[in-house]
Image (tube, grey):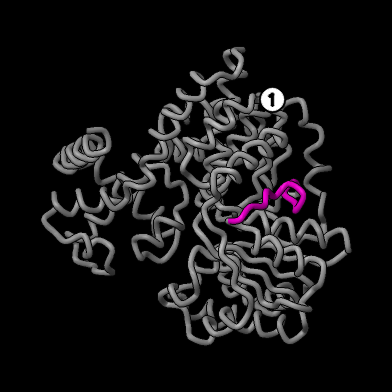
């Protein structure tokens, strides 16, 4: 069964604790699933939220590796199983809705000084299609609410019976290559150039892909000329995206660009309160303030921490308290500490392999450097919580997530077969772990 293969891959990518706690208990509903829909059944709403927040993209990617089709991941609680079909048909006017979240709206977006301008612009374009601001680019670090605003726009205009396309740049690229291979580019263009709102995530991943940029530019031009609303997100400004063609950079900069910044403490408190309401969690203000003061990561990690805290609460039947919050924070910070360690991993591998760190992130095909690069991928995937292969590809200047996946499989096989390489990998892991926990 395909789920067994997906589990096998996930076991190599996810820490043993999280695999056994969250992934292993999942049941795959083969009867309800299709090529474009994978239905996963979990025990309770807390695991549902945790898996949806942290692993949905990784699971979908692994299905794609095996079946060549990236499905929508539908995670349901066992008692709600009968509602899958109805839920899947919801929002039928949303095209390419693999991860379209109907629960994220303007009403539950917490506004503060860090995001007020971006929120205001997003609300304006939802109320007035291509009238005042077009295109719009919302930029900022990962996990600060950019995608939430795209969903909010989509949900708002859906009520006005507008045709919406929400898609990530990775999905746009996959669709482009699929239609190109099948000689059905007219269908591709008809789909993406005939909508009222074009909402696209992570346009920084257009970098260095000239043919894709050509198609995106033509799509952009067709939509813009027909007064269709274009809203994009990026983790950086257009001028900071290396390998982005000048004409696209000019189009992006010609619209409204708004930054979302890291939330200040007051906004974090209100975000935690909102997340508690969304997930029907009752938590004392004292604990909420403690979390806001001690979580320095992005909103996505704030939600992950809340869900993990609630999971511990539900499993132990103990009331929320500061001690529980401290223990969960220790776990979370230990897990997420790997996210800032990619540079450390690169430096450690470079030192042990007697090459420069800059060579690892170069495009050199010298075998020694390629192996070092593959070791970085292996160590990052096994020691870090960077769960997006697209992000890792960007950091290492590789083509895309599929290149990372291929390299990971190659180096894993080599490590299994080569005792010297296996020992080197163990030594590298020990050095990195010691540097993380001196």
Q: Which residues are magenta?
A: 103-113
Note whether 301 is above or below 140 in the view shown: above
Dot 1 corresponds to which residue?
282
Magenta residue check for 106: yes
Depth check: 377 or 181 in front?
A: 377
Q: Classify residue 48 as left or right of residue 213.
A: right
Name the residue located 77 percent from the left edge and 60 percent from the top edge.
94
Task: Determine if residue 182 is in view.
Answer: yes
Considering the image in quadrants, where does the N terminus appear?
top right
Q: Is residue 1 magenta?
A: no
The residue under the point 34% across, 61% down is 396
Residue 118: percent from the left, percent from the top?
Answer: 64, 63
Q: Position of residue 112 (x, y in %)?
A: 63, 52
At which x and y percent is residue 215? 59, 80
- The 10 Å Cα crowd at callout 1, few under 14, some 14 to 19, many 20 or more, is few
**Residue, x 65% and y 59% (percent of image)?**
116
Q: Position of residue 338 (x, y in %)?
A: 36, 42
Q: Quadrant of residue 208?
A: bottom left
Q: Specify whether residue 215 is in view.
A: no
Vertical side of 247 occupied by 176: above or below:
above
Judge left or right: residue 217 versus residue 107: left
Tell me: residue 69, above or below residue 186: above
In this rendered view, identify the residue nearer to me: 416 or 58.
58
């Amino acid at each position: 069964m395909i789920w067994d293969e997906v589990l096998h891959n996930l076991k190599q990518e996810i820490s043993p604790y999280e695999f056994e706690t969250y992934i292993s208990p999942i049941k795959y509903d083969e009867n309800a699933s299709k090529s474009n829909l994978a239905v996963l059944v979990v025990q309770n709403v807390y695991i549902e939220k945790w898996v949806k927040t942290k692993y949905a993209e990784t699971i979908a990617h692994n299905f794609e590796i095996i079946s060549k089709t990236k499905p929508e991941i539908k995670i349901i609680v066992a008692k709600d199983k009968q509602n899958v079909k109805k839920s899947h048909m919801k929002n039928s006017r949303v095209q390419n809705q693999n991860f379209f979240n109907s629960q994220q709206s303007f009403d539950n977006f917490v506004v503060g000084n860090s995001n007020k301008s971006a929120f205001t612009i997003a609300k304006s374009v939802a109320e007035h299609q291509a009238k005042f601001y077009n295109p719009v680019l919302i930029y900022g670090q990962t996990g600060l609410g950019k995608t939430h605003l795209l969903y909010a726009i989509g949900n708002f205009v859906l009520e006005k019976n507008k045709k919406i396309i929400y898609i990530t740049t990775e999905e746009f690229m996959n669709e482009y290559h699929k239609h190109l291979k099948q000689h059905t580019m007219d269908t591709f263009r008809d789909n993406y150039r005939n909508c009222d709102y074009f909402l696209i995530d992570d346009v920084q991943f257009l970098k260095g892909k000239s043919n894709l940029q050509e198609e995106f530019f033509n799509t952009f031009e067709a939509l813009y000329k027909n007064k269709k609303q274009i809203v994009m997100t990026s983790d950086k400004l257009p001028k900071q995206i290396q390998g982005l063609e000048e004409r696209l950079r000019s189009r992006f900069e010609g619209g409204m660009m708004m930054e979302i910044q890291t939330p200040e403490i007051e906004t974090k408190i209100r975000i935690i309160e909102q997340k508690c309401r969304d997930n029907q969690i009752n938590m004392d203000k004292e604990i909420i303030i403690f979390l806001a003061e001690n979580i320095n990561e992005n909103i996505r990690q704030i939600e992950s921490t809340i869900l993990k805290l609630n999971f511990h609460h539900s499993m132990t039947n103990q009331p929320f308290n500061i001690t529980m919050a401290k223990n969960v924070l220790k776990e979370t910070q230990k897990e997420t500490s790997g996210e800032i360690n990619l540079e450390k991993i690169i430096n450690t591998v470079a030192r042990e392999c007697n090459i420069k760190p800059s060579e690892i992130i170069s495009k050199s095909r010298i075998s020694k450097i390629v192996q070092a690069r593959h070791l970085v991928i292996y160590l990052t995937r096994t020691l870090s919580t960077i769960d997006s292969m697209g992000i890792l590809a960007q950091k290492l200047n590789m083509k895309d997530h599929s290149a990372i996946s291929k390299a990971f499989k190659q180096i894993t096989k080599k490590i299994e077969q080569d005792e010297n390489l296996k020992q080197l990998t163990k030594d590298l892991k020990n050095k990195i772990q010691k540097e993380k926990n001196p």
